[in-house]
Amino acid sequence: MLNPYVTRINIMLQLFFPPGAGCSVCGSSTLRLVVEYGMIGPDMPNLPDLKGLLPEEIAAALAPLGAPAFRAKQLFAWLHRRGVTRVDEMTDLPADLRQTLSTHFHLTAHSMLERATAADGTTRYLFGLADGQTIESVYIPEATRATLCVSSQVGCPFGCTFCATGQSGFTRNLTAAEIVDQVYRVQAELPEGRRITNVVYMGMGEPLANYDAVIRSVRLLIHPLGLDLAQRRITLSTVGIVPGIERLAQEGLQVNLAISLHAPTQADRVKLVPIARKYDLDSLMAATRRYVQTTGRKVTFEYTVVPGSNDREADAEALAALVRRLQSLVNVIPLNPAEGQPAGMRLHPQELRARAEQFAEMLRRRRVEVAVRASRGGEVTGACGQLRQRHRPKKLFSTSLSGLV
Ligand code: SAH
Ligand code: SF4
């Protein structure tokens, strides 16, 4: 069901600071002003969201309403195992409790606005949120598993030069309920017997910049009364938020961590990943080493090959030296063409894949453990962020200033 959309003006001044001072969030000295006239939905209801609570928290929230604690487990299972979207679907709860719940709590449930499926079954979803914002998720079925790529923020504040999400700016963090509901909405429409087995936080946004909601969403997804996903089937991908990596190491979780490296030297990395000015390569590598020591878990380095920028023999040599002594895998990613990328990055997808394969070969010759990300979904996948850009609510006018140094 679609949200009842309303029309209003949305003015957003995103970053503004004096020349040379740099942004305290991403280290960039970029000014970005966005003025939109758009179709956006009603504000989110100001009630606690039941879908973001763990069973013991539901029990605590129910106590003042006179509901017994065992109802919390029932409720949690309805929300996180069966994926219901309305309290009145919880048929084993007494009618008066259902009535009380619907007046005291909100239940996040995304509207599915668009769905695009490629020949190989890869499906890109555009979801509408309660406040009219949109996010996307990508479902990737394979023979032995089915992965959902979820978003953690509406947009992203970090502006990596090749990333469509980063180029479209940042609006807000998602709540834990808004993160897990992407999984439940997609699961609800899969054929009988087909289950989402893996979740990767590689959609829109930076998971470690929305740390609390992301960790809460992981705890919801792995809960035995809910979907009960295996921790090792969950991957958090980060652009390199050092304090987030430090915190994650202490979390006691067994999820996978992927670090978006993209360049083996500080000088080249800042050109692709502006936040590297704040969290430089040395501190990122030091935090990664501590993470591996503390958790005993192998990390993955993501390396998007941007021809001419990070795929020279010297880059392969420097990257091999950087990762050699770490328990790690380098995931080489062919660049996906995306709106907003600099002209120099615009090559044919086949050429981009060939350049990624060549770079992977350079690494293999240096005995680095490498995987090249398979091309899935053809026209529908691309880089996360593109679908939202093409289908944003209709605008009367839009102003966007960015990249002013
Ligand atoms: N913010 C997190 C997770 C979301 S991006 C991060 O940066 O890790 C997930 C992955 O997609 C990252 O490795 C990112 O660098 C990569 N990516 C983004 N845009 C891309 C593009 N146009 N082509 C190839 N990979 C891209
Ligand atoms: Fe944000 Fe990740 Fe895109 Fe960089 S690559 S802009 S951190 S979503």
Image (tube, rainbow, N blue to C red):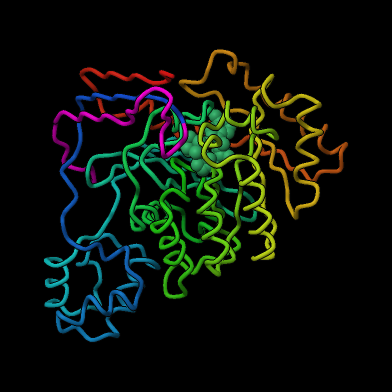
On screen, residue 251 above or below 176? below
Q: Is residue 223 left or right of residue 231?
A: left
Residue plotted at (18% across, 65% down):
105
Q: Nearer the viewer, residue 185 or 151?
A: 151
Q: Nearer the viewer, residue 41 or 256?
A: 256
Quarter-of-image position of residue 51: bottom left
**Total of numbered circles in the picture?**
0
Assess whether residue 16 is covered by the magenta stretch: yes
Is the stretch drawn in magenta largely helix, strand or loop? loop
For residue 84, say whether it is visible: yes
Residue plotted at (66% across, 36% down):
303
On screen, residue 72 above or below 79? below
Q: Position of residue 315 (x, y in %)?
A: 76, 29
Quarter-of-image position of residue 368: top right
On screen, residue 285 above or below 277? below
Q: Quadrant of the C terminus?
A: top left
Q: Nearer the viewer, residue 287 or 334?
A: 287
Assess whether residue 294 is covered by the magenta stretch: no
Span colored in magenta = 1-27
Q: Position of residue 397 (x, y in %)?
A: 23, 17
Q: Is residue 304 left or right of residue 243?
A: right
On screen, residue 405 above or below 245? above
Q: Position of residue 225 (x, y in %)?
A: 42, 75
For residue 121, say whether it is visible: no
Q: Position of residue 15 (x, y in %)?
A: 33, 30
